[in-house]
Image (cartoon, rainbow, N blue to C red):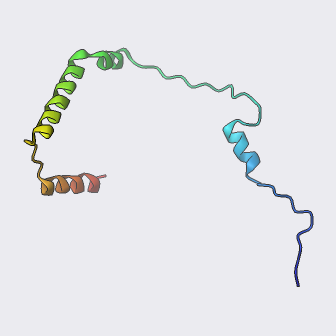
Amino acid sequence: MKINPIQTQHVNPYKKHLTKIDGIDGRKNSHTEKVEISPQAKEMHNSSRIQTERQEMINRLKSNFENGSMNPDAKKTAADLLKHFRNL
């Protein structure tokens, strides 16, 4: 015996909930977020000393890698990774 659906609507019951979350329902979201950055954080961000040191280190690593003088120990790297992830 075959049962045919009568007047089935293809409605997703979660769609209304999702549109409210996404803000698609036409209403404007009046809630705004504000982030304040401390003067110390701004100073650290703009510190040229830190940026130059970082860039020097990156350049040194790049040159070592390109020259082939960088020889990382695979076993030590794996052991350090295991130690790091076990402590999480």
Q: Where's residue 67, x and y in %? A: 10, 38
Residue 5: image quadrant is bottom right
Q: Residue furthest front?
A: 67
Identify which residue, 62 or 76, lies in the foreground. 62
Q: Where is the N terminus found, in terms of image quarters?
A: bottom right
Count of picture labels: 0
Q: Is residue 43 left or right of residue 49?
A: right
Q: Residue furthest bottom?
A: 1
- At 10% from the left and 43% from the top, the residue drawn is 70
Q: Where's residue 45, x and y in %? A: 32, 20
- At 77% from the left and 32% from the top, the residue drawn is 26
Task: Identify whether 74 is placed above or below 70.
Answer: below
Q: Where's residue 4, x and y in %? A: 89, 73
Task: Identify whether 46 is placed above or below 4.
Answer: above
Q: Is residue 38 left or right of residue 84?
A: right
Task: Identify whether 10 is placed above or below 68.
Answer: below
Residue 25: image quadrant is top right
Q: Is residue 47 left or right of residue 39?
A: left
Q: Residue furthest left?
A: 69
Residue 78: image quadrant is bottom left
Q: Residue furthest right?
A: 6
Q: Where's residue 59, x and y in %? A: 17, 29
- At 36% from the left and 14% from the top, the residue drawn is 39
Q: Is residue 64 left or right of residue 31?
A: left
- At 57% from the left and 25% from the top, the residue drawn is 33
